Amino acid sequence: MAFKLRVVLLVALLLGFGCSDDSEDSNNENNQNNVNNVNNTNSLVCGEGTEARDGECVSTVVQNQCGEGTTLMGTECVPDNNVTPVECATGTTLMNNRCEPDVACGPGTTANASGECVPDSMIACGAGTVETNGECLPDPTAVVTCAGSTVLVEQECLSRAEALAASTPTPSVEPDDPTFGGTETALTLPAVGDFIVASGVIDVPEDLDSNGQLDQDEDYFTFTGSAGDVLEIELVNDGLAEPHVRLQYKDTTTYTWEKTLPINVTIDPIRYFVLPRDGEYQLVVTHAAKYRQLVPRPILGSPDYKYFVVIEHAPALAPTDVTLPTTVTGNFATHTDSAVRLVNAGGEGFAVVDGTFNTDAFEAEITSLDASGRFSATDITPNPLAFSVRDNTTFLVEWEQFAPGADDFTMNIDVLPSQAAGTTLSNEALTPGAYNFYSFHPPQNSLVEINVTLASGPASDLEPVIALNNFDLININQEFTISGPSVTMRHFHTDTTPLLIVIADAQPGPAGDYAYDITFDATPVNVVGTVDTNTTSVTGTTAAVDNATTEWFAVENGAADSAQLTTTMSPTNGLETLMGNRYDVDAGGKLSPESAFTGQAGLDVQDVTVTEGGGYALYEVTVSSLGMTTVGVSTSFVQPQIYTSSPAATISNAAIINDTITVPGTCTVADITVQMDINHSYIGDIRMDLTSPGGTTVRLWNSSGGSQSQIVGTFPTTLNPAQSLTPFVTGVGNGDWTLTIEDTFGGDDGTLNSWGITLFCN
């Protein structure tokens, strides 16, 4: 537009000035022509190097204005085919008929026609990679071998921690320590052959119970497992250099079972676990310093104490089938190596195991799992052991805690023959420090009597112990020490399983064997019936009895808790006088010391006893003369008085707390049980006393239990008191009962959630 305006102005100027000479006329003529041209082109504006001609813009370039080797064609200079191409100097290249500088491309690249550096199609990639679109990428078909402890993840070698972090683990969710009111992080066991990953941090200690003392961080995970599940558990250290990892059965009121990963090892600890029963399990991770026997106990934690736990659901045990007797050799660390199945054990019975075990480096166990799923375990000692067995019972040699050391073992297994009722074995030899085992299968509902009489040996120095186990129990539930020349052990046997009798030397003394005689007897017992909250009374009649015979009868307390049983015995022959003994029998068949009773001729005899849930009142009855009589029996059930307190009181370091329950009315104690619910991060720090209204004090707990975290149950039924509760009996029951708890050691705290007393009053 600007160019057009300039032309119009120039024309206007030329028309405005006249001249009389020829040149002036000529200029006027030219100007007129220009004006005409402008008018003819309708004000056409042409670009640089062109001009308007006949309504078109044409080039003003002449031939000699094109460069060497080019020719004007139309309005452009194009290469002249008849001319030798231009030769460019060194370091330049002809591009678009111009000499352009060469492009300097790096290794593996080359310049394209546009002068750009692009990948060379012959690029050389390293091992395990392949060229893709000019890049060296991991070869999906290559076999990659990772060095050291690194692992292959998507063709890349990563550390174990890096790989597990990429697997989306389940992190611990604080607060997760139930000791301080937290909730465990829930896990779900995978299918067999699969695994899950959990993660966490043993963080800086905090005062979790607001008592002014720091508490050790412990991460709790929980999952549900089944008896016989095999788990391979490994802790992968990502900063937690000294881990303590344990797996435990959660409900310690019904069953105690815990095992740890290897301790004091320089590699990531790993081991197999065989779950003993159905139920919930806790996996606990903390710093190992918590369980060192140091004073004061260190409390450690850091944001850098990170870890991963890998839980693999391994295939079920595949034990080696063996016939008895047999010798088994194996390795503690390999569960498949140390599992054997007994195929000819017969019916219910026992097997004896002895052998060579490395107990310096291990807290080792032999576990037995029978075909019915019943599971039991016992610590290995240098002496022989006995186990309940049936056909297809599996034995597994494993360890509770492990430190580096030798781990081989040799185990000899043989069937224990069963003894018949009325059998006497004479001159049985026992070496100091050893065990002798006997199997006895009495009838159901019978009074078992095992008599042991010393025949020779230094009895004054050696203290042999006679112990009896129910078939499905490994821990001794009855024990007698022979303090004189002989002892008789009594047991009320109410089921059909065999019994294991153990004769042992409690305190090995001087060298030398000693001998003894042992007799096995069983007397039938008439079980009159069962009383409980629904059936509050039962009646029955005994067989005929005189002064030369004894009749045994029993009444069962079918309630879950202890109850008062009042039994009336009535002689059918009104001339006879009843007399005898009463025994309280616990749920395991153990008899309490006898309590004698007697009456008058023709009169009833009434006896009151307190029997624990599942236990029995057992009576031995005779008469005073030669006459025969049967005895009528009538027993009633009385529920106890129960009192509770729920203080939720903090049990803090080196402090003492008291809590009181007040019993109203009037009561003379016939029996008492004490219920307790305590959480504490180290129950071995606790001492606990109970004081009655009359001032009698009994110690319930005396710094036992170690690192366990709960005291939950009932004294003396499911919890063993440090001292007997018998001193409370016949004392005053109404008034204030005071519970005193002392935490004797710093670094661990807890809570008295609740407690209670159950009283039976006369």
Image (cartoon, grey):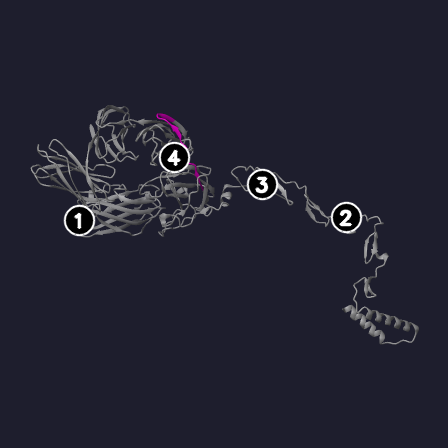
Tell me residue 642's x, y (percent): 23, 49
Q: Earlier in the sequence, mark 4 or mark 3?
A: 3
Q: Which residue is mark 4?
A: 399
Q: Which residue is mark 3?
A: 140
- From the image, which quarter does the N terminus lie in? bottom right
Q: Is residue 120 left or right of residue 262?
A: right
Gap between marks 4 and 2, in whole Å? 81 Å
Q: Earlier in the sequence, mark 1 or mark 2?
A: 2
Question: What residue range appears in magenta?
Answer: 310-327
Is residue 264 part of the magenta span, yes or no?
A: no
Q: Is residue 233 left or right of residue 511?
A: right
Q: Which residue is mark 2?
A: 93
User: What's under tag 4, amino acid-wise?
Assistant: Trp
Tag on residue 667?
Answer: 1
User: What's under tag 2, amino acid-wise?
Assistant: Thr
Gap between marks 4 and 3, in whole Å? 43 Å
Q: Secondary structure at mark 2?
A: strand
